Image (cartoon, coloured by chain):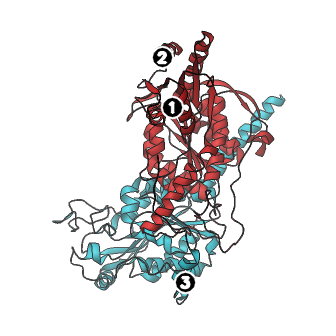
């Protein structure tokens, strides 16, 4: 067939770069951000900036070279984190950040691979991938920003929305119980499980730093305000009001039984490092069981042939 | 154990196993998959062979994860592959789209069975060829190869890896259950006889490097993780730097690029086998296991003095439109036997553009055509 298309100007890199380099470098954290990717898309009062800053701070504190870091994200507000970081970053499909990261981490074991995503992405559409990656103990750091709703699409109920909470698709209150994420992560086999709120910025940095020292599947839940999607229908006030709520209603209980850290609407939030364990990660077992087995089998074959 | 990657010599193996060997010989070192009849033997062969050659086999929780994992592994710097059949192919579509949009090389083997849905798990079908072309949402170019024998399962898997590296996108090996489960002689050539395309690397630290350059008809070399390029890879509409830009202009450039790199290079990619075409009055267009039956039918017809010809598609996509168009001027009819209710037949009909009759010999799945059926049908036009 004949095709008619609009005329199209080629990509002008210089113009694009000039437009983006404006103001870059004024903030000390800018060296971890891709030039010109700020301003970000997040709402005023959103907790994502705090978690992103905590991640950068932890990397900086541990002296992790950016060339050895990769961040993989899914879809949603948290999914946009990857696009701001100046390192190898992958913004994948909804719920699939973990399996994509699994391939990346196994193919390139020298990389520190972090999955940075939201509660809906990781635990609704991506829930199955989460439990299997934890079970396999793939060398991945999962950082879940939990704001109890689907923020990007305007505040719908999600897998972590507490019972009774209102969202745009539960206008009279949620009839389902939300996931207790640390309990789920622990049961599935994560070797490190912690929960903090964005009020606990320092503890969050410390926890993320700890995961850089750990091999295997680590999980941090960062509870974050979403005044636009979740705060408004539940009358939680502004982002600042939610931070006050975190200060007053959080209780640090390191080592707490993850089975007892459920989150209920307007009730106490138990935070802390709950699990810090050791077990061989996927590649260790793969080498000792699969590769060693294949080598032994080949040797046996050779011997058989010689005999 | 590097010498274990190309098992030079004569083998008596299944198409599924030959495809796995083709992958390993082509440099595939990462396989993620999920058991499914009739493709499980590809995964089983990979599970046995990859640990021998320093590669990784991982069985994922489903085909969605398998497809995501091979994309991740490709960005991790390994050539990667998965295999499946219809139901798994459906699940992979989401991340096949991601692979097209992010220009990620990898190979997806589909050993087709009868569908839709669970259909005929153990029996043959060829009904996923349009899904291969159009299955993921949005526009993209497609490369799909259809082997007719275990030997071609080996050869075309190698070819699929080469094409995926050149054009930087997922490439499909669209085999069928008959070919996948057929055991025949497969000759694996010597290492130096294998033509392999190594993944082009960006030149170190070139400041003008654009990871998603769209100015030429070939994609930019791929900067995988850990090379210091800090590429942002996204399924969102992105500019040549990889940055998401949600505008109509960038969408035009982005989509035209991922379509045109195949569309405008189609003549370099298209492969088919022609027999007795010069003076043919009726041409049988077939592929996969049906191609073998069609060859027998056409040879029988020729032996009886009838002017039948064979066009066996090796690339289903891109489709050899120019060849069909030319033949349409000369022949009375195209006969298209395929194991579906009309897929490639539509493409033949569209391309023949009313100049020659097109007859579909459809089978819904579970059996193959006989040479006699094809001979009788062709005979109606002679």
Q: Which residue is mark 1?
A: B38
| Upstream in sequence: badge 1 or badge 2 | 1
The reply to whether residue B296 is visible in this rendering is yes
Tag 3 near tag 2, CB within 8 Å: no
Residue under numbered circle 3: A21
Cα distance between the residues tagged 1 and 2: 37 Å
Q: Which mark is residue B381?
A: 2
Asked if badge 3 and badge 1 are on a common chain, one would say no
Residue A30, compared with residue B42, is above or below; it is below
SS assignment at label 1: loop
Marks 3/2: CA–CA distance:
69 Å
Badge 2: chain ID: B
Find residue B88 and report its image quarter: top left
**In the figure, the red chain has which letter?**
B
Estimate the spatial distance between the alpha carbons at disc 3 and disc 1, rounded to whole Å.
54 Å
Q: Same chain for marks 1 and 2?
A: yes
| Residue at 65 percent of width and 64 percent of height | A110
Q: Position of residue A112 (x, y in %)?
A: 59, 67
Chain that bears disc 1: B
Q: Is residue A33 visible?
A: no
């Amino acid at each position: 067939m004949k095709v008619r298309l609009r005329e199209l100007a080629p990509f002008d890199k210089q113009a694009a770069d000039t437009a983006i380099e404006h103001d870059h470098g004024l903030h000390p954290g800018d060296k971890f951000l891709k030039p010109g990717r700020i301003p970000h898309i997040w709402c005023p009062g959103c907790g994502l900036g705090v978690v992103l800053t905590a991640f950068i701070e932890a990397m900086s504190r541990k002296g992790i070279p950016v060339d050895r870091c990769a961040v993989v994200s899914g879809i949603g507000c948290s999914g946009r984190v990857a696009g701001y970081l100046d390192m190898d970053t992958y913004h994948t499909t909804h719920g699939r950040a973990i399996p994509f990261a699994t391939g990346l981490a196994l193919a390139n074991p020298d990389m520190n691979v972090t999955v940075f995503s939201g509660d809906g992405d990781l635990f609704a559409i991506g829930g199955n991938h989460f439990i299997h990656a934890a079970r396999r103990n793939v060398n991945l750091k999962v950082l879940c920003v939990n704001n109890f709703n689907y923020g990007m699409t305007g505040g719908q109920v999600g897998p972590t929305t507490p019972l009774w909470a209102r969202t745009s698709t539960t206008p009279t209150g949620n009839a389902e119980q939300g996931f207790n994420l640390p309990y789920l992560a622990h049961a599935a086999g994560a070797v490190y499980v912690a929960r903090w709120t964005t009020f606990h910025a320092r503890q969050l940095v410390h926890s993320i730093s700890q995961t850089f020292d750990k091999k295997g599947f680590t999980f941090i839940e960062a509870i974050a305000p979403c005044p636009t999607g979740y705060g408004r229908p539940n009358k939680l006030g502004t982002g600042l009001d939610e931070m006050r709520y975190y200060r007053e209603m959080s209780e640090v209980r390191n080592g707490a039984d993850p089975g007892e850290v459920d989150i209920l609407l307007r009730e106490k939030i138990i935070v802390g490092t709950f699990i810090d364990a050791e077990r061989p990660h996927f590649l260790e077992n793969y080498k000792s069981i699969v590769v060693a087995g294949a080598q032994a089998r080949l040797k046996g074959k050779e011997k058989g042939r010689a005999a | 154990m590097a010498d274990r990657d190309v098992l030079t010599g004569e083998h008596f193996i299944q198409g599924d196993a030959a495809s796995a060997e083709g992958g390993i010989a082509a440099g595939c070192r990462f396989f993620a998959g999920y058991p499914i009849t009739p493709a499980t033997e590809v995964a089983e062969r990979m599970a046995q062979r990859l640990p021998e050659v320093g590669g990784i086999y991982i069985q994922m929780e489903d085909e969605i994860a398998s497809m995501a994992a091979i994309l991740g592994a490709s960005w991790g710097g390994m050539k990667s592959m998965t295999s499946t059949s219809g139901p798994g192919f459906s699940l992979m579509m989401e991340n096949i789209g991601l692979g097209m949009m992010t220009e990620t090389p990898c190979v997806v083997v589909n050993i087709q069975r009868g569908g839709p849905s669970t259909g005929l798990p153990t029996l043959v079908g060829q009904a996923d060829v349009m899904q291969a072309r159009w299955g993921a949402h949005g526009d993209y170019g497609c490369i799909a190869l259809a082997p007719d024998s275990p030997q071609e399962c080996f050869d075309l898997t190698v070819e699929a890896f080469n094409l995926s590296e050149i054009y930087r996108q997922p490439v499909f090996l669209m085999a069928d259950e008959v070919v996948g489960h057929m055991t025949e002689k497969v000759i694996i050539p010597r290492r130096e006889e294998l033509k392999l395309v190594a993944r082009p690397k960006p030149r170190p630290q070139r400041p003008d490097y654009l990871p998603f350059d769209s100015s030429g008809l070939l994609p930019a070399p791929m900067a995988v993780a850990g090379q210091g390029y800090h590429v942002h890879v996204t399924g969102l509409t992105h500019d040549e730097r990889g940055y998401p830009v949600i505008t109509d202009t960038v969408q035009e450039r982005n989509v035209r690029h991922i379509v045109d790199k195949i569309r405008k290079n189609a003549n370099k990619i298209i492969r088919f086998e022609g027999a007795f075409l010069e003076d043919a009055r009726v041409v049988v267009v077939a592929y996969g296991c049906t191609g073998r039956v069609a060859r027998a039918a056409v040879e029988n017809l020729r032996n009886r003095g009838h002017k039948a010809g064979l066009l066996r598609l090796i690339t289903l996509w891109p489709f050899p439109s120019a060849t069909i168009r030319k033949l349409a001027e000369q022949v009375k009819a195209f006969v298209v036997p395929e194991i579906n209710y009309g897929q490639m037949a539509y493409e033949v009909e569209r391309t023949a553009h009313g100049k020659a009759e097109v007859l579909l010999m459809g089978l819904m799945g579970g059996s193959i055509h006989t040479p006699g059926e094809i001979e009788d049908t062709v005979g109606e036009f002679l």
